[in-house]
Amino acid sequence: MRTGFRGLHPITPLLFFAAAFTVGMTATHPLLLVGCIVSGAVYDVCLRGKRAVKYLFCVLLPAAALITCFNGLFSHYGVTALFRLPGGNRVTLEALAFGGVFALRAMGALLWLDCFNEILTPEKIICLFGRFAPKTALLLSMALRFIPLIRTQSAAIDAAQTGCGNAVRTGNPLCRLKTAAHRFSVLTSWLLEKGIDTANAMRARGYGLPGRRAYTGFFFTPADGVILGLSALAGVLYGILFIPLRASYNPVFDIPLPNAPQAAAAAVLLLILFLPPIFDFTEKKKWKQSRFAT
Amino acid sequence: MEAVTLRNVSFSYPNTEKKALRDISLSVPAGAFVALCGPSGSGKSTLLRLMKPELAPHGTSEGEIRLFGQAPEEISLRCSAQNIGFLLQDVEYQTVTHTVRSELAFGPENLGLDDRVIRLRIAELAAYFSLESILDKKVADLSGGQKQLVCLASVCAMHPGLLLLDEPTSQLDPAASVTLLEAVNRLCKENGMTVILSEHRLEQVVPMADRLLVLENGKILHDCPPKSLPAAAVKENEFLRRAMPVSMRVFADLGQPGPLPVTVAEGKQKLEALFENIPQTPGGPAPAPARVKTKDPAVEFRHVSFSYDGEQFVLRDCSLQVPRGSFFALMGANAAGKSTALALMCGVLPCRGGKISLLGKNIRQYDPRTLSGGVAALLPQKTQALFGGNTIYEDLYYSLSSAALSKEEKHKKITDAAAFMDVAHLLGTHPYDVSGGELQRAALAMILMKNPQILLLDEPTKGMDNVYKHRLAQRLRGLCDSGVTVVAVTHDTEFAAQYCDEAALLFDGATALQADVTAFFTENYFYTTAANKMARSVLPTAITGAQVTAACRDVIKN
């Protein structure tokens, strides 16, 4: 059992990330977009450290810059011409901005997807499936068991075949293809034969009885309730703000300024987006200090 | 109450004349620990599977089977799943799901138990089998021993009254086997579970068992507590003479009155009593002369290092000399680098640090096309990895595909090799329809067709019974006499002591000890044979049962 977001019932992070992902994918207003990206990036860095920084600066930002430039070079709508290309086409501020916004939306969605991957481990996804599709959940779990097994098995076959000299590692491609085909047939016979063992072991333990249930080791706690409520609130606020804060960049910039209640709603929404790192940090701090009272 | 009652049970598989089981009658009271033994093919698995309705083999059976008073046909799937646990040999394929926690939950989930009950069962099992630290691990990341323990625990999650185990330790190393067998013994002694277990490793099982059931050719040969097994029976039956614990073997051979000692400790007491009035020659009898005459190495490692990932050394500055024409045992704990050393010897892995010489020539100077197989050939631990055709002949033919021979020459080569390994009658059979020992011999035939000078074996005795081991060793010794060098990675101390010339112990990727087998095992205190442990106080240099028996005969004569 982990503290923070990792320890919650899987449904909670699923719905939270769904909300954050939707904001990232569909927001057009720069305020919401930037808020969503910054919160996503902060949480990704909290979760994955250096790897997330590398992902952000070496993959996402260059890709975003590239998309922006592409749109600027190949779309020519808008009214503010910045300069002309040698071919005679204009490069406009609006086209660049539209490309930039598109790239930022993709970036926000990808950052939150990264967090999703880190928090929702295969066990949690299987647990989510177990509720409404127990057979699929079992199938997923079995697949996760068999993939590494097949990998070690084929490595064993490769080593065995090479070690006794049944290998054509050099020479014409046809021979090498034949070697590969033979190894594949060894692997399939092995897997089919051993599949009988698995089926027997499952049957021996009562698989096939009616009324199978899916067990999950996760609880729904009060903290889950609070965070689910806040996720729902974020969804509602975003729904309210979606129309009034819709910005468009073609043919002219039209970025609405929020009025006071809208600004307040947006502030609450952004605060909720920063919830995961705040929650993780406070839990960590809270439990780090627990010692025997002296 | 009787857990299992069999009355005049016979069984035959479809399309065979021979009966797999003949006229078996036995009754097992609840809470008993029955060890089922017998040579391969004697019907152990068939008998066990008849006691689990879902796994019962297809065929015709006669007689009466009662499980907790019920006939197998009357037992529902639910009742069988709850009351009769079955553990198979294969550690990999009887796990179903991907984490330990979900594996333990699998059985109770099938029964439709609710979350609270399943949670409690997992909690209990984790505490009983000490699985807390691996509960959230992936099954794929566990060691073989851990996997089998998880399988046992997940069978116990259903709270069975009867536990059937079909050679559960055949794929485990000795340390992991002891852990598993002790867990089974605890379930029997502490929780009153009825245990019926078939096993080749009798050294550990026999002392635990209340009853020993010896099967041969589908018939019950003996059914008695291990202590009451008649000495004459052990002496005369080939299987018992090779398979029983060394203490029983030695005293059966000596023909001393009284019950046979079952454990090493009992054997030690009896031996010490026998030697009490004998003036000790200091150091005991002179050790047998070293069997290896030549010092000319067939395989030489000089400061060899190896790493798979660039972070962790598997071999570190390992030096080793395998004399030409010798039968060499490479021993050591798991992950000590034994299999890696073998893979380096036959060129499956490249030698990047240090120097490896084969037959006096640097391994890098060999043509890679003839090195693996032609110079040094490896017999893998799981010989299924060499067979994928419809018949064994097809696979043997495939392995000659790069040889420049005519069809007739290839055919002759195959039939000769098969005849030499005694598998000629199996050439037309599907590789999965023969026993483990037969498939291993077919694999050896495949390898020997290429005439390698160095034969490398990875755990050749795993899952084999002692009679088979003896025949295999005879063949390998024959190869050594004709000049082939045999290197076997093995955990089997008895096998190494009995048949090998020299042994090396790898530890932390380097050679901790290399010596001829007598010196090797007498120098070790824990890592040695049961015969040596039993006799070391009176016969320090005796490492096999035969040596102990011979020394005792001399004492009795005088």
Image: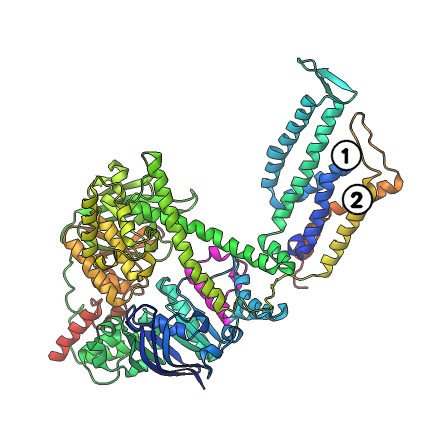
**Residue span colored magenta:** B128-156
Magenta region includes residue B360: no
State whether residue B216 appears in this view: yes
Q: How crowded is mark 1: few (under 14 residues within 10 Å), some or many (20 or more)?
A: some
Q: Mark 2 points at which residue?
A: A238
The percent coordinates of residue B141 (x first, y second) are: 47, 55
Residue at image location 28% in from the left, 63% down from the top: B493
Q: Say which amino acid is labelled 1.
A: Pro
Marks 1 and 2 share the same chain: yes
Residue tagged 1: A30
Q: Which of marks 1 and 2 is nearer the N terminus?
A: 1
Residue A278 is labelled as none
The chain ID associated with circle 1 is A
- Does residue B328 sit above or below B257 in this rendering? above
Q: In this view, does B362 lie above or below B81?
A: above
The residue positioned 49% from the left and 71% from the top of the image is B156
Residue B101 vs B85, above or below: the answer is above
